[in-house]
Image (tube, grey):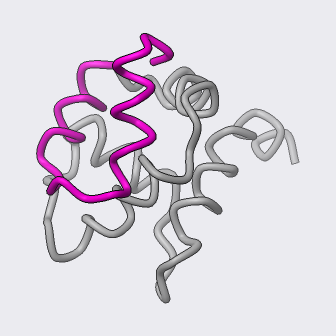
Amino acid sequence: MLNTVKNKASLACQVRINIRCKKDMSYQTLAKILRNELPYCKEEHQRYLLGFFEECYPSLMKKFMKEQSISRASIITLFNLLPNQGEKHNFERALKNEEF
């Protein structure tokens, strides 16, 4: 139970990235991809990452980053690998407005 409370933002991100996917991805896997501990695979990971950038608002991302020791640079690097799609709009706006 303590782990659940400790990783509250991570669990919220996990729920949000899995909304549109049949198979769930854990927040631990997401964190490994963002920390570059697990190589990004377009076929396997792109939908989850687009979901992350569309469904997770900047303050939630920052809490997730803190819980999982992920740098801002790592998130932006991975963001830039994704195709230009509507899912990226909210995060692009947050970057432009210096909310992230």
Determine whether, in the image, residue 93 is placed left or right of residue 14. left
Which residue is found at the position 39% from the left and 26% from the top? 70
- In the rendered view, tell whether residue 58 sits above or below residue 97: below
Task: Indicate the quadrant containing the C terminus: top left, top right, bottom left or bottom right.
Answer: top left
66 drawn magenta: no
Quarter residue 66 falls in:
top right
Q: Nearer the viewer, residue 2 or 81?
A: 81
In the displayed image of the protein, which residue is found farthest to the right? 1
Compared with 65, 42 (above or below) is below
Is residue 42 found left or right of 6 in the rendered image? left
Count numbered badges in the picture: 0
Q: Residue at x 64, y 62 (%)?
A: 15
Is 35 positioned to the left or the right of 87 in the image? left
Task: State whether residue 19 is above or below residue 71.
Answer: below
Residue 78 screen position, x and y as percent: 20, 40
Q: Main secondary structure of the magenta part?
A: helix
Measuring 58% from the left and 73% from the top, which residue is drawn there? 19
**Residue 91: x, y in percent?**
40, 36
Nearer to me, 62 or 26: 62
> Residue 10 appears in which quarter of the rendering?
top right
The stretch in magenta equals: 72-100
Q: Residue at x 76, y 42 (%)?
A: 3
- Residue 93: image location, x then y, percent: 40, 29
Residue situated furthest bottom in the rendering? 22
Which corner quadrant of the image does residue 80 belong to?
top left
Closest to the observer, 38 or 99: 99
